[in-house]
Amino acid sequence: MSKHATFTDRVRQAILSSGVSRYALSKVVGVSQAALSRFVNGHCGIASETLDAVADALGFQLVVDRSKATLRPASAGATRRRK
């Protein structure tokens, strides 16, 4: 992935690399498969609550800071933090 990838690019790549079907992920996350596909294909964004659910479903921790946002593997027992 490019060094200049945006946060949403990283989320998209995490979805594509997960091996989880968009259908299965959409059911776990609670959005339509069409909405998830539009996001993955770069046609639209998704709500922050949905990003949280995607991160949880894929085993990532969503960490948001005013100056940057990162997506990293969640450690066992970690809680979601927002600054």
Image: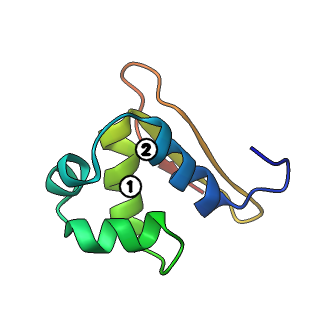
Asked if residue 22 lies left or right of residue 12, the reply is: left
The image's colour scheme reads rainbow
Q: Residue at x 54, y 72 (%)?
A: 42
Q: Say which label, 2 or 1, has the lower sequence index.
A: 1
> Callout 1, which amino acid?
Asp
Residue 36 in the image: x percent, y percent?
33, 66
Q: Secondary structure at mark 1?
A: helix
- Disc 2 marks a residue whose amino acid type is Arg
Q: Which mark is residue 52?
A: 1
Q: Residue furthest right?
A: 3
Residue on which disc 2 sits: 80
What is the x, y in percent for residue 79? 40, 36
* Of the two numbered discs 2 and 1 in the rendering, the one whose residue sits closer to the viewer: 1
Q: Position of residue 26 (x, y in %)?
A: 22, 57
Residue at x 81%, y 48% (from the top left corner)? 2
Toward the top, the furthest residue is 76
C-alpha distance separating marks 2 and 1: 9 Å
Please state, as top left, top right, bottom left or bottom right, where the N terminus lies in the image.
top right
Q: Position of residue 30 (x, y in %)?
A: 17, 62
Contact, CB < 8 Å: mark 2 with mark 1?
A: yes
Closer to the camera, 64 or 47? Answer: 47
| 2 or 48, nearer to the observer | 2
Vertical position of residue 79 compared to residue 76: above or below: below
Numbered label tally: 2
Residue 41: mark in rendering: none
Foreground pick, 10 / 69: 10
